[in-house]
Image: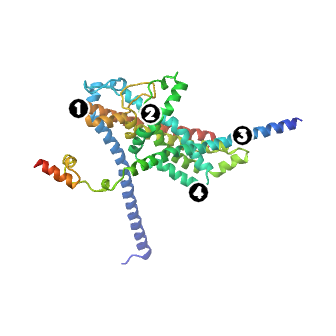
Amino acid sequence: MAESIPTVRRERARTHVQVRLFGDRIFNTATFVLALSILALLFGLAVALIATSFPAIRAFGLHFFVTTEWDPVNDQYGALPFIYGTFVSSLIALVVAVPLSLGVALCLSEMAPDWLSHRLGFLVDLLAAIPSVVYGLWAIFVMGPWIRDYVEPPLAHSFGWLPFFQGPKVSVGMLSAGIILAIMIIPYISSVCTDVFRVVPHTQREAALALGATKWEMVITAVIPYGMTGVIGAIILGLGRALGETIAVAMVIGNSAEISASLFKPAATLASVIANEFAEATSDMYVAALIELGLVLLILGIALNVVARLLVLGVQQRRYRETGK
Amino acid sequence: MAAGVSSLHGETSYRYRKFKSDSMMAVTVGATVLTLIPLFLVLGYLLTKGVASLNWRSLRPCPRRSAKKAAEWPTRSSARSRWWGSRA
C-alpha cells in the first residue's frame, strides 16, 4: 500500500535535514582540525627547538640566562647581553613610536578630511611595505651617520651626566637600532589605532562636544578611553614586531655581546645574533646555544601575547565595572 | 562686577582650552609629517642611488661561465684576442 503524501514529504524533509546536519558536522570538524593544526604547529616548533637546543640547556641550565659571556672559541655561552639588547632596543622603539603612532592615528581619524585621510593612510601603510633589509641599508648609509653627527652630540651635551648618553658617538649602536625599529613599527601601531578610533560611535563624540568640550578634550574624554583596548593591542602588536625584527637590527646595532648602559654603544639582540652567527656556527654546542636563543625569543613572544591578553581583559573588565557594558 | 570677572575668567579659560586643543591637533599633524619623512627619505635614497647605477648590462642575463672565469674574461673583442694571444 502506498504511503500518504504528507508522510513522504516528512521523510524527504527529514533526509534533507540529516544531509544538512551531516554537512555542518563535516564543516565543524574541518574547522576544528584546522584550528588545532595551528596549535600543533606551535607545539611542534617548540618541541623541535627544545630538542635541538637540549645540549646547551643541559650544559648551561639557568646560567644561560644570567651570564654575559659569549665565547664560541671556548664553548661558553650566556644569553643575557642579547636579552638585554632585545628589551632595550624594543623599549626605545616603543618610546619613539607610540606617541607618533597615536598622533598619526588621531590626525587620520579626527583631523583630516576623508579624501586626505585615506591618502595619508595609504602612505603610512606604505612604510610597512618596505623590506626590512632596505631599512637596514638606509639606516647604515643615511640614518646612522646622521644620528652620529646630529643627534648624539646634542644628547651627550645636554644629558651627558646620564649613563645612557655617555661614550663614543658611532653610527651603529643601540640608539640607531631602536630608531629604525620605531620607524618600522609605526605603520602597524598607527594603522590599528586609526581603525580603532574610526569605530568609536559618533554619539560619543557628539555628546562630548555638546557638553562644551573642545576637540582635544573630546579626543581625551571620549575617543581614547573608548578605544583603549585596541590601543593596547596595537602597542603589543608593535612590540612583538620589534622583538622579532632581525635583518634591519642586525645591520645597525653593531653586534657586540656586551651590556652597556650607554645607548650609543654597539649591542646585539636575540634575533640579530642568530642571523649573524648561525652560518659560522661550527660546533654542535654553538648551534644548540643559538637555537636556545631562538627558543627564548619564542617564549618571549608567547609571554608577550599572554600579557597583552591579560591587559586587554583588565581594561575590558574595568570598563564593564564603570559603564556596565 | 563679579559677573564681569567671572565672564572674563570664563573667556580666558575657553581661550586657553581652545589654544590647547589647536596646539594638540597641530601636534598630531606634525606627528604625521614626521612619520612620513622616513618614507620619502628611503624612497628618495633608493631612487637616487638605484637609478644612477642602473644600466642595460645589469639587466642582461648572466653568462653561463663561472664567476672566476667571467672575471678573467675581457669584455672587448680586441682585448679578448690579446688575452688568447698571450696564452698562446
Instruction: From the image, tell me which residue sits under label 4.
Output: A115
Give percent across and percent down for residue A145.
44, 35
Q: Report, in whole angstroms, how far the alpha carbon at label 1 lies from the one at label 3.
A: 65 Å
Give the amino acid at mark 2.
Answer: Ser
Instruction: From the image, tell me which residue sits under label 1.
Output: A284
N-terminal of the pair, mark 4 or mark 1, is 4
Instruction: Tell me if mark 4 has few (under 14), some (14-19) or many (20+) residues whose alpha carbon lies within 10 angstroms of its own.
Output: few
- Whether callout 4 and callout 3 share a subunit is answered no
Q: Are marks 2 and 3 in contact (CB under 8 Å)?
A: no
Which of A174/B38 is in front?
A: B38
Q: Is residue A172 above or below residue A161?
A: below
The disc label shown at residue A89, or none:
2
Give the amino acid at mark 1.
Answer: Asp
Q: Quadrant of residue A24?
A: bottom left
Numbered disc 3: what chain? B
Which of A54/A2 is in front?
A: A54
Instruction: Tell me if mark 3 has few (under 14), some (14-19) or many (20+) residues whose alpha carbon lies within 10 angstroms of its own.
Output: some
Provide the secondary structure element on which disc 3 rests.
Answer: helix
Q: Report, in whole angstroms, how far the alpha carbon at label 2 lies from the one at label 1.
A: 29 Å
Looking at the image, is mark 1 or mark 3 nearer the viewer?
Answer: 3
Q: Are marks 4 and 2 in contact (CB under 8 Å)?
A: no
Looking at the image, is mark 4 or mark 1 nearer the viewer?
Answer: 4
N-terminal of the pair, mark 4 or mark 2, is 2
Give the amino acid at mark 3.
Answer: Arg
- Whether callout 2 and callout 3 share a subunit is answered no
Provide the secondary structure element on which disc 1 rests.
Answer: helix
Who's the residue at 18% across and 48% down the image?
B69
